[in-house]
Amino acid sequence: MTVGDLTVADGGRVVRIVAIGEVRDDTATLASAADPDAEREYVITRWLAPMPTGADVITCMGCLWDTHLWTDATHINRWSGHRMRLIRCARCYVDLLRVRDVILHATSTTIRPHHLER
């Protein structure tokens, strides 16, 4: 893990590592991948996991299912404008389309167009 790597933090949020060891040797300073000017967060590095690739299985933090059908997208709340980049299963992604605008960055290699239809 190095500074600048994209990682998945708890809650399935996508964040950028800004610094390592700024607070303690085992902590990382994180910035939101969707809003780099947002307030910085500090986490213990063992709670971070690499970004999923290919057909990796993830645990969706929206529904807690283990699945290989995942999406990486920036979700924008239509009412507040708040932006958050999340890793979610295809089903949760489709459910969120009702209340959020979404910018899709990547999907698992096993996703097909019908998985992302409402």
Image: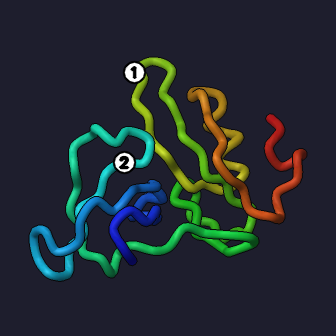
Residue 98 lies in quadrant: top right
Secondary-structure class at tag 2: strand
In the picture, the quarter occupied by the N terminus is bottom left
Q: Which residue is mark 1?
A: 80
When the figure is inspected, residue 107 is found, relative to residue 100, above or below; the finding is: below
Residue sitting at x 44%, y 41%: 34
Q: Which residue is mark 2?
A: 32
Left or right, 39 with reference to 50: left
Disc 2 and disc 1 in contact, CB within 8 angstroms = no
Neighbours of disc 1 within 10 Å: few (<14), some (14-19), many (20+): few
Residue sitting at x 16%, y 74%: 21
Q: Position of residue 107 (x, y in %)?
A: 72, 56
**Residue most extreme to the top:** 79
Q: Position of residue 97 (x, y in %)?
A: 65, 32
Tell which of 42 and 5 is nearer to you: 5
When the figure is inspected, residue 54 is found, relative to residue 40, above or below; the finding is: below
Q: Position of residue 19 (x, y in %)?
A: 24, 65
When the figure is inspected, residue 80 is found, relative to residue 36, above or below; the finding is: above
Sequence-wise, which precedes: disc 2 or disc 1? 2
**Which amino acid, mark 1?**
Ser
Residue sitting at x 20%, y 81%: 26
